[in-house]
Image: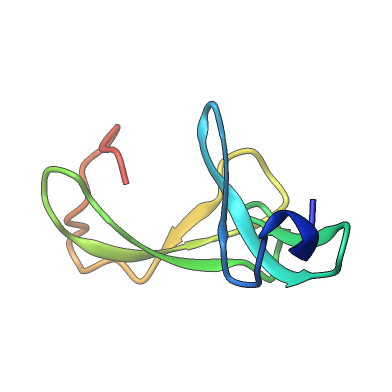
Amino acid sequence: VGTAQGVAADWLVVSENGLVGRVVSAGETSSRVLLLTDVDSRVPVMGERTRARAILAGDRSAAPRILHLNDPPLIEADERL
């Protein structure tokens, strides 16, 4: 979908499983989406329990890396971001 359906750049793209990416540009009938797994993707995230902040960096895998954690890491294993 595109601007004819109301889509605009910087909108979030979600599926039934959660966040997928964001719209980087929108034409009249289609949009270009930068996926979370793309190597150019960098998204600020926060841990649900700890409230610790980090960067989710795409690396072409199903499990993007978490960068810029404090030392020691504050985000806990299996914590939702």
Q: Nearer the viewer, residue 65 or 38?
A: 38
The answer to whether 27 appears left or right of 47 in the picture is right
* Looking at the image, residue 77 lies above or below residue 11: above
Q: Nearer the viewer, residue 67 or 34?
A: 34
Number of numbered discs overlaid on the protein picture: 0
The answer to whether 69 appears left or right of 56 in the picture is left
Q: Quadrant of residue 39?
A: bottom right
Q: Residue at x 16, y 56 (%)?
A: 74
Q: Quadrant of residue 52?
A: bottom left
The answer to whether 30 appears left or right of 24 in the picture is right
* Looking at the image, residue 49 lies above or below residue 22: above
Q: Quadrant of residue 33?
A: bottom right
Q: Residue at x 54, y 26 (%)?
A: 16
Outermost residue, front side: 4
Q: Residue at x 47, y 66 (%)?
A: 43
* Looking at the image, residue 27 lies above or below residue 6: below
- The percent coordinates of residue 55 (x first, y second) are 41, 66
Outermost residue, left side: 50
Color theme of the render: rainbow
Outermost residue, top side: 16
Q: Residue at x 25, y 37 (%)?
A: 79
- The percent coordinates of residue 4 (x first, y second) are 79, 60
The answer to whether 14 appears left or right of 25 in the picture is left
